[in-house]
Each structure stands twice: as C-alpha cells, then as structure tokens.
Amino acid sequence: MSELNPAQLAPYVAWGAFALAFVFGAVGNKTNFCTMGAVSDWVNMGDTGRMRMWLLAIGVAIVGANALHLAGVVDLSKSIYPGPNFTWLSYIVGGFLFGVGMTLGSGCGSKTLIRIGGGNLKSLVVFIVIGIVAYMTLRGILGAFRVGVLEQASVALAGGQDLPSLLSTALGLPKKILLWVLSLAIGGGLIAFAYASRDFRSSFDYTLGGVVTGLVVVGGWYVSGKIGYVAEDPQTLQEAFVATNTGRMEAFSFVAPLAFSLEYLMLWTDKTKIITYGIASAAGVIAGSLAWALASRSFRWEGFRDAEDTGMHLVGGALMGFGGVTALGCTIGQGISGFSTLALGSILTFAAIVAGAAATMKWQYWRMTREG
C-alpha cells in the first residue's frame, strides 16, 4: 500500500484497528479478561488465574512485537514508550492513581468498554468521565499540572529507556543480540510462568484470553507501524504514521482514545477530524463485546446501586482519566502495548498500577469489616 497517500491509507488503519479491537472485545467478554479482576482475585482470594492470563498476554505481545521489530517489519522505537525521556514520577503517580481508579470504577478502560457492550450503564458513565478528565489532562487545566510539575521529574536517557538500549549502553553489547535474548527470556518466561499452574492449563478460556489479547496487540503494531507507515508524507516530506492521535506508531490503549472519541462525536461536522486508530479501537471493543453478549444471551442492563456506588464510579473514572494520560497508558496501553517494547517506564507503570489497585482493595476490605 506504499503507493497510497496518507488520506487513502487512513481508512485501512481505522478499519484494521476496529477489526482487531472487535476480536478483543468479544474474547474479553467471553473469557472475563479483566486486569482489575486479576489483581482482585490475587489479593483477595489468592487465585492467580486471571493474573496469569494478563501475564500470558504480555509474554505473547513481547515475543510477537519484537519478532516484527527484528524482522524489520516495524520499528518499535518510533512509538511513544521507549523514548529517551524517562518521566519516572509521572509513571509512578499516574500508574498508582489509575490502579486506584480502576478499582473504584469496577474495571480499567478496556473493561469499561467491554461492560458497555454487555449493557452496563454504570460503565457508560465511567467512559464519559474518563474521556472528559483525560482531555483535561491532555490539553486542559490538569495538563498544566502534569507538564509543569510531574513531568519535570525526569531523566534523559541517551539511548532510549527500553531495556536492550539501557543494557547495551551499560555492557557494551550489541543491542540486537540483547533484544533477542531479553525478548525470549522475559516474554518466554512470562508464558512459562502462566502455564506453570495446573489450574491455568486446564482452562481454555485463560489461554484464549491471554493469547488473543497478546496477538491483538501485535496486530495493532502491524496495522499502525506497517500498513499506516508513510516514509515521506507529500505535504511534510517527513515520515508519518497515518491516522494516529500521537503522530507516532500506536498499539492499543484505552484512556486518551476515549477522550478523542468524545471529541470526535462533539465535533462531528468538523471535516478536519477523522476516525483515528484510537477512536476506531474504542468503538471496536464495544461492538465486539456487544456481539458476544447478544450471541451468548448474556446482555443485561445494569445501573447504579445507590448514591455511594455512583460516587465511587465517578471518582474512579476521574482518577483513570488523569492517571492514564499522566502515565502514558493504562493496563493495556502501558501494561501490554508498552511492556511489549520492553520500556522501563512501562514496567514501572505496570507495577504502580498493580500497587494502586491492591492498596485500594485492602482499604475496601478494611472499610467493609469496620462497617460490619
């Protein structure tokens, strides 16, 4: 498709993202893939099944994405994750707050979309709050705090913050060799860990959810980084990644795209606005989840229980909107897509999200026992 111009390529990117997200939404609904649930099962019940499913997805994404990179199909260094600006405080604060928010809001950004497809009206409200606060953090009043305070705590890493680059600089070894070794060691190690559990191996849904989610992220890199790549944009005479909000190669993430989805709906008649990779992916998850819910007859309307339930979800959505943008991603964006690039910031964000969710669950349990 290299002979097509950016405007002609945009629909291919958008439809590719929609198709992949549709599969993720359907499979996520069927297998109950939920990163918040993964932490909850582990912290509250000692059940690691869904946590292993999440780790399996990460492992598959690492192996698949870096195989594409090493084959020269895509260049992961051109995504936002492995860049040289290591904003450590943003990763920690944003990730932790996102973890708190996804616990209060009954699921992360992707689970919110999956729940909407299943008829959950609470998640529709959370979607709107995530989108509004995310936009405020991107370009509004919260963005001033993000840029002026949190992002000031950063370290410039000349070779990039991905582990192969860091170790290549430290050890003086070829980056390509380190990329091979680390991809297989970390990705393969996570896959092996997931299947080390007999209970995990006995569940087809665990394998389906983990493998498909990982492959969907790999497919996302291909759509954005290969199909949507233009070596020289006729207008700017520079390389370009078509139909992405960041202007760089993207995979799946579900915080900022919710903001851009609301913007697109509000500015529908503005002909300069197009359906981007992120907007199409958000719509695809809802559509895929809805399709499975209808096919399996599991579609159910669900609303808020009471005022406290409403308040918790509103706060949760706000924290996810701010935290996800601040940390450059969510449990899918940083937790799988970013992790697949072996970026140190993504690994730090992943840990911060889990810590925030676990701490909030402990607080909820303490509050429940106190009231009891």
Image (cartoon, grey):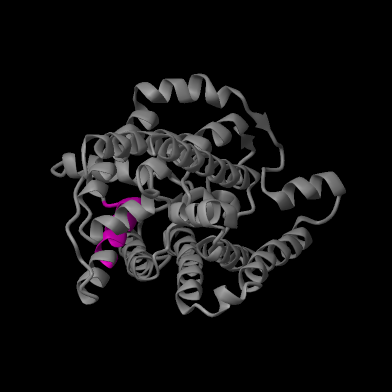
The stretch of residues the image draws in magenta is: 275-288
Q: Residue at x 50, y 63 (%)?
A: 50
Query: Which image quadrant for residue 34?
Result: bottom left
> Taking 165 as reference, is 186 above or below it?
below
Q: Is residue 116 magenta?
A: no
Q: Residue furthest front?
A: 372
Q: What is the tally of numbered marks visible in this picture? A: 0
Q: Residue at x 31, y 59 (%)?
A: 114
Q: Residue 108: x percent and y percent? A: 40, 49
Quarter of the image where the C terminus is located: top left
Q: Residue furthest left?
A: 269
Q: Is residue 279 magenta?
A: yes
How would you classify the magenta stretch by its main secondary structure? helix
Q: Residue 90: x percent and y percent? A: 55, 32
> Taking 68 as reference, is 113 above or below it?
above
> Taking 146 as reference, is 130 above or below it?
below
> Taking 1 as reference, is 146 above or below it?
above
Using the rendered image of the protein, determine whether residue 368 is visible from the camera's viewpoint: yes
